[in-house]
Image (cartoon, rainbow, N blue to C red):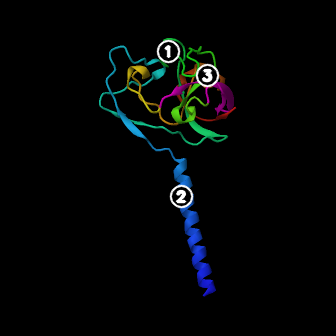
């Protein structure tokens, strides 16, 4: 009788352990939180500098309140953005209400990583192409909103974006003709 109880207890504990492990894995995922229906931008209202996308009438874009978990080597997708006045980044940066030169290594992070301004004016280290560069977080790449005037009629950002100035791309040694999208890793500096 004792071995049967012990076996049942062990089996029960094993099932509980597997179940809690599955919950931990599920918690690490970041699923879409909603979607936005695209509107056609008014003429001249979507800045396509740096090959930025403009919202398409009727297309649904996923939104995210979260980003993948941050580690010492977080995988992300590097995009190109101008933080200068009149650039495709739109208005002044969220962190300091300023514009930043394309020659300064600055970035915007997807909403979850931006962490309600928790990373504002902090540095991150970006690695790719056999090189690393330190850049300051100055803005949010909004994953929750888009397709409106406040977002330059661009779609919401995916949840894994590090949107970088030209200075970051130069520092990583990426040939100019290949700027625009690159798999990278990043960490808090």
Q: Which residue is mark 2?
A: 22
For the residue carrying disc 2, how many other residues have a C-alpha within 10 Å: few (<14), some (14-19), or many (20+)? few
Question: Could you tell which of marks 3 and 1 lies nearer the N-terminus?
Answer: 1
Q: Looking at the image, is mark 1 or mark 2 nearer the viewer?
A: 2
Evaluate whether residue 73 shows in this view: yes
Q: Pick the quarter of the image with the N terminus.
A: bottom right
**To which residue does mark 1 refer?**
87
Disc 1 from disc 2: Cα separation:
44 Å
Mark number, residue 106: 3
x then y, percent, for residue 85: 52, 11
Location of residue 6 in the rendering, given as x and y in whole percent from the top left corner: 62, 79
**Left or right position of 62 against 14:** left
Label 3 Cα crowd, 10 Å radius (few <14 / some 14-19 / many 20+): many
Residue found 37% across the figure and 26% down from its top: 55
The magenta segment is: 119-142
Q: CA distance from mark 2 to mark 3?
A: 37 Å
Q: Are marks 2 and 3 in contact (CB under 8 Å)?
A: no
Element class at badge 1: loop
Foreground of the two, 59 or 22: 22
Q: Is residue 149 above or below residue 35?
A: above
In front of the other: 102 or 114: 114
Residue under the point 57% across and 35% down = 113
Task: Determine whether, in the image, residue 45 is placed left or right of residue 23.
Answer: left
Residue 130 left/right relative to 68: right
Determine the secondary structure under disc 3: strand
Residue 126 among those drawn in magenta: yes
Q: Can residue 182 be spotted in the picture?
A: no
């Amino acid at each position: 009788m004792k071995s049967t109880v012990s076996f049942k207890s062990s089996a029960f504990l094993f099932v509980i352990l597997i179940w809690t492990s599955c919950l931990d894995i599920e918690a690490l995922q970041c699923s879409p939180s909603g979607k936005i229906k695209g509107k056609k931008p008014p003429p001249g209202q979507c800045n396509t500098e740096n090959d930025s996308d403009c919202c398409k009438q009727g297309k649904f874009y996923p939104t995210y309140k979260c980003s993948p978990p941050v580690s010492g080597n977080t995988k992300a997708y590097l995009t190109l953005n101008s933080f200068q006045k009149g650039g495709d980044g739109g208005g002044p940066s969220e962190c300091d209400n300023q514009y930043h030169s394309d020659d300064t290594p600055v970035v915007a992070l997807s909403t979850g990583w931006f962490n309600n301004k928790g990373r504002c004016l902090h540095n991150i280290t970006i690695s790719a192409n056999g090189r690393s560069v330190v850049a300051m977080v100055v803005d949010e790449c909004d994953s929750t909103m888009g397709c409106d005037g406040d977002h330059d009629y661009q779609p919401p950002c995916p949840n894994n974006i590090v949107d970088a100035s030209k200075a970051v791309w130069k520092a990583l040694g990426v040939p100019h003709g290949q700027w625009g999208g690159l798999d990278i890793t990043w960490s808090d500096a």
